[in-house]
């Protein structure tokens, strides 16, 4: 008993120093003005037209990226989960490998690839094909998000899929279900927890990122993450930056709650 | 009951180097209750999975109603399976689990509801409709697995140790229910168990398997009374297997004495194995039996006493309703009809295969 308490000490310290205190500070800055007086005006800054636009764009791009990730990841996770371990190892490695490289570096690499006079366009020129002009557009940002966050969608889905008992699938087939019915009525519902954590792990970082939009969107694509970054760094206005962060946090919590609720409702009527 | 419904012809199956089934031949007749009986790992589940379509045999044919069904997927086969590990759908209620097959077939709502009620009553779990599988005990899950398969009224039901998780009382009730069901619906049962008592009470035909080979096929009486080799004798019930010599037809030399028996055709002075069931050994006064022995151990078993009797350096297992204290001298005799003579296996391989020349 005493030992256990002792063991949890470092975690407690960690939680207080790096989770609780920063959160308290964000809430403090977010809910006060320069004079230290309580105010909601920092939160209300979200409603300015520019900020709303940035939030809307961020929501749209991260939603699209999340959907694309899901569509790409699910079939791949299924293929991986059906193979035996030795084959999976290699396949998984190919998709996980990029994760071992620096995030910034990977995104910079895409910048070089996509640039007006970048690698891809040089190649296209060589082949006398029309140029690709997606750098500094929302498409490039979405591409960056999908590329960077895809593994976070694959892993949780692969995890739940590989844990489904093969005989449960056999039982569905045995009871007359064809492949499609088995997928829709058994495999998909059973993999919902993996889908949800995959969505969370892709949607949240996409919604808050400013690096990807900075590097692949140029100065043209302003997401809510960029706005907050600018408030903190260029504006040095911690109050507004924190206020916007709080609103964004509430947004994320609300959307997660929505997904969780939908999942609960879904369970009963899935069939 | 005479026509073959399923014919298993020369079926082999191995996993990597591990040969699980080797050129297995077996047919199952319509309305038969056929039990696959054998020790753990002998290939019972594998054979059942091949019938269900979840494994493909490496070679050989599965003939169903005269047609080769090797390439037919499980959902197109007219049989249903009760899986060894239940394999219930954890994201559905019990009612939805049972209804699964019927919904796929597009049965009407009323029909399905009736069936669910009927099936739950059958497995003694009325009122469990809205529970989820996780909230059920192992035995209850097992019964739901039976209910889920049975509502589909398949031609053949494959059951893989379907009563393994139940206590004795419930198991006996379910055995009775399954047999009633089989007679009522005219379903052919292929039943896997390693419980020999269950096999003896329920089956029309028992197939004793060992290491992927069929040891003996026969009625429960055949298997129990006339085991064809030492493996079957040992596996079914308790038995004394004694190395003996067949002197001539109907005369066997065993335990240092000459006994009268009824077996013929083993030749003269041939080494054989003799099987004596513990309940067939009769204890009499010393000197009045064929040989004498001494009681070395006695345990009360409820209906009978179980004794070890040392006779000519062989410890015989004897069941008797009379009690003989340890150290008692007894005479031993056996009715000639109760001495079962078997050929000795020539080698270990032959023992596994049950080859009889
Ligand atoms: N998918 C598989 N891959 C590799 N080996 C397998 C596989 N399935 C079964 N085996 C092997 O085949 C042999 C027979 O297995 P099987 O499950 O048929 O035994 P069983 O008679 O049903 O045993 P039990 O009574 O314990 O259920 C075992 O040695 C097992 O290890
Ligand atoms: Mg088994």
Image (tube, rainbow, N blue to C red):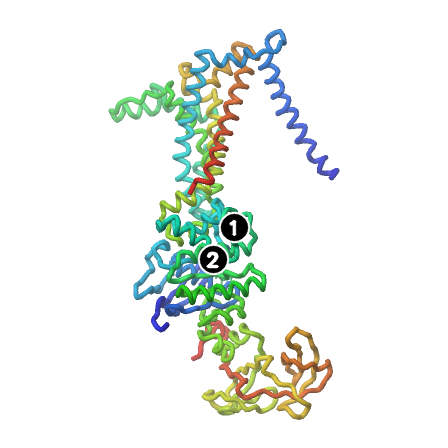
How many residues crowd around disc 2 within 10 Å: few (fewer than 14), some, or many (20 or more)?
Answer: many
On the image, which quarter does residue A141 sit in? top left
Measured from the top left, where is residue B38 in percent x and y? 50, 68
Q: Mark 1 lies on which chain?
A: B
Identify the residue at the far right of this view.
A2
| Closer-to-camera residue (B355/A89) | B355
Q: In this rendering, does residue A232 appear at all?
A: no
- Decide if residue A77 is on the left or right side of residue B61: right
Residue at mark 1: B128
Looking at the rendered structure, the secondary structure element under dot 2 is helix
Label at residue B146: 2
Residue B77 can be seen, yes or no:
yes
C-alpha gap between disc 2 and disc 1? 14 Å
| Apparent side of residue B54 relative to residue B299 in the rendered image (left or right) | left
Q: Is mark 1 on a helix, strand or loop?
A: loop
Vertical side of B279 occupied by B186: above or below: above
Q: Residue furthest toward the left? A: A128
Q: Give B287 or B109, whichever is nearer the viewer.
A: B109
The answer to whether B239 appears left or right of B122 in the picture is: right
In percent of width and height, residue B58 lies at 37, 61
Are marks 2 and 1 in one subunit? Answer: yes
x then y, percent, for residue A43: 53, 14
| In the depicted structure, whether residue B165 falls above or below residue A265 | below
Q: Which chain carries label 2?
A: B
Residue at position x 43%, y 54% from top? B115
The residue shown at (26%, 26%) is A127
Residue B306 in the image: above or below residue A250: below
Compare marks 2 and 1 and give the one earlier in the sequence.
1
Determine the residue positioned at 55% across, 59% down: B165
């Amino acid at each position: 008993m005493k030992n256990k308490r002792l063991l949890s000490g470092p975690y407690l310290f960690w939680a207080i120093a790096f989770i609780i205190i920063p959160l308290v500070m964000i809430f403090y800055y977010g809910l006060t003005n320069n004079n230290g007086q309580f105010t909601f005006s920092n939160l209300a800054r979200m409603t300015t037209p520019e900020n709303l636009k940035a939030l809307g764009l961020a929501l749209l791009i991260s939603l699209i990226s999340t959907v694309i990730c899901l569509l790409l990841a699910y079939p791949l996770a299924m293929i991986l989960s059906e193979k035996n371990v030795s084959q999976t190892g290699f396949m998984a490695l190919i998709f996980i490998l990029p994760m071992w490289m620096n995030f910034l570096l990977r995104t910079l690499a895409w910048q070089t690839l996509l640039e007006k006079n970048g690698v891809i366009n040089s190649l296209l020129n060589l082949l006398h094909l029309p140029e690709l002009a997606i750098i500094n557009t929302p498409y490039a940002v979405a591409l960056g998000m999908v590329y960077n966050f895809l593994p976070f969608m694959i892993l949780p889905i692969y995890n739940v899929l590989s844990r489904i008992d093969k005989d449960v699938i056999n039982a569905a087939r045995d009871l007359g279900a064809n492949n499609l019915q088995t997928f829709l009525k058994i495999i998909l519902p059973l993999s919902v927890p993996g889908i949800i954590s995959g969505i969370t792990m892709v949607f949240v970082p996409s919604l808050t990122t400013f690096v990807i939009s900075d590097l692949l969107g140029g100065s043209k694509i302003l997401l809510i993450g960029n706005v907050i970054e600018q408030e903190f760094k260029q504006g040095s206005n911690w109050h507004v930056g924190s206020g916007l962060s709080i609103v964004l946090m509430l947004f994320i919590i609300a959307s997660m709650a929505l997904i969780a609720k939908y999942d609960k409702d879904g369970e009963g009527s899935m069939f | 009951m005479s026509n073959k419904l399923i014919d298993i012809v020369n079926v082999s199956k191995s996993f990597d180097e591990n040969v699980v089934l080797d050129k297995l031949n077996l047919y199952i007749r319509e309305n038969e209750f056929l039990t696959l009986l054998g020790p753990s790992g002998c290939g019972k589940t594998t054979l059942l999975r091949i019938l269900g379509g979840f494994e493909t045999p490496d070679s050989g044919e599965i003939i169903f109603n005269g047609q080769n069904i090797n390439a037919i997927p499980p959902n197109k086969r007219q049989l249903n399976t009760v899986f060894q590990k239940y394999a219930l759908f954890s994201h559905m209620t019990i009612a939805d689990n049972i209804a699964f097959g019927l919904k796929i077939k597009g049965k009407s709502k009323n029909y399905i509801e009736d069936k669910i009620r009927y099936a739950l009553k059958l497995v003694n779990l009325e009122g469990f409709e809205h529970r989820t599988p996780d909230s059920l005990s192992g035995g209850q899950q097992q019964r739901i697995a039976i209910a889920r398969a049975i509502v589909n009224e398949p031609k053949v039901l494959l059951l893989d140790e379907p009563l393994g998780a139940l206590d004795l009382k419930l198991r006996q009730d379910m055995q009775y229910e399954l047999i009633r069901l089989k007679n009522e619906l005219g379903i052919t049962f292929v039943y896997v168990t390693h419980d020999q008592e269950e096999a003896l009470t329920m089956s029309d035909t028992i197939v004793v398997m060992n290491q992927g080979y069929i040891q003996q096929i026969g009625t429960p009486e055949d298997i129990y009374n006339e085991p064809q080799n030492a493996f079957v004798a040992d596996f079914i019930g308790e038995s004394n297997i004694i190395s003996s010599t067949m002197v001539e037809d109907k005369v066997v030399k065993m335990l240092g004495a000459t006994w009268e028996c009824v077996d013929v055709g083993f030749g003269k002075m041939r080494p054989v194995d003799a099987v004596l069931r513990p309940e067939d050994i009769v204890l009499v006064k010393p000197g009045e039996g064929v040989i004498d022995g001494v009681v070395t151990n006695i345990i009360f078993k409820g209906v009978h006493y179980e004794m070890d009797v040392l006779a000519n350096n062989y410890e015989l297992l004897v069941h008797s309703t009379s009690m003989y204290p340890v150290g008692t001298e007894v005479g031993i005799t056996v009715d000639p009809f109760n001495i079962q003579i078997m050929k000795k296996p020539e080698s270990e391989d032959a023992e596994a295969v049950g080859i009889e020349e």
